[in-house]
Image (tube, grey):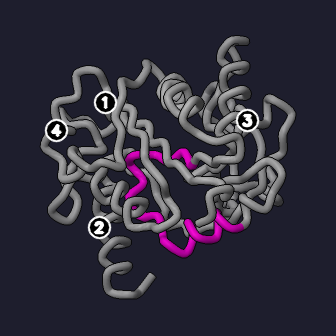
Amino acid sequence: MSADAPRYWVAIPAAGIGSRMRGAVPKQYLRLLGRPVIEHTLAIFLDHPRIHGIVLALHPQDSEWPRCEYADESRVTTLPGGDARADSVLAMLDWLLPRAAPGDWVLVHDAARPCLLREDLDRLLTRAAAHSVGGLLGAPVVDTVKRADAAGEVAETVSRERLWHALTPQMFRVGMLHAALSDALARGLAVTDDASAMELAGHRPLLVEGSRSNLKITRPDDLPLATFFLTSQANGES
């Protein structure tokens, strides 16, 4: 990589406590094929030659991270996260801003998405870098979508045409995402993911199709599915 080429950073918010998993251990530290979920997630990026460094936002009382394989990895920087995901992302961008060049990119990825395919990451790096704003991995909606009313009854069937599930990583210029997220939070706007902050700032991120195996571990029954996907990848079946 030339001296003038942009660098690629990864920001991983991992300060959540995983309440929907109904367990004492945050979901990013649950065991998956013999190691914590977060180790699988980090390995994806540490094994990639274009990733310059990783920033990890942890809960202030996190006692699990020091026991992880990558706790002493020089390319991984940890810092305290915030109350909400967006606060943690902003804290990592605050750290990155004085260290990144104007053209550097940041890929924000969920700690509990351990099944990202290398080919999907490569596709995002190539296509988002060629876009004026950046982009995110996504998967077109294939199921019928219903909107419910307050009573939990079907109010309408929503057309799934051009609807996508937003996945991660989501890749944007460090400075542009910092400005967009800072402004959205200062205005008290709801920021459900990093792309939504860019959208609120008037940008139109590119959707890059990725595999549906890139699931986010949120509920207990997600772990067996993640085990299946990772085993399939290891066997060359992805």
Q: Viewer-nearest of labels 1 and 3? A: 3
Vertical arrangement, residue 181 with respect to residue 170, above or below: above
Residue 17: mark in rendering = 1
How many angstroms separate mark 2 from mark 1 (CA)?
A: 21 Å
Q: Residue furthest front?
A: 3
How many angstroms separate mark 4 from mark 3 (CA)?
A: 32 Å
Residue 104 appears in view: yes
SS at badge 2: helix
Q: Amino acid at mark 3?
A: Met
Which numbered disc, 2 or 3, marks the residue that appears first in the sequence?
3
Q: Position of residue 142 (x, y in %)?
A: 67, 65
Mark 2 — residue? 227
SS at badge 3: helix
How many angstroms separate mark 2 from mark 4 (CA)?
A: 24 Å
Which numbered disc, 1 or 3, marks the residue that appears first in the sequence?
1
Q: Which residues are magenta?
A: 107-126
Mark 4 — residue? 66
In the rendered structure, the answer to whether residue 170 lies left or right of residue 180 reads left
Q: Quadrant of the N terminus?
A: bottom right
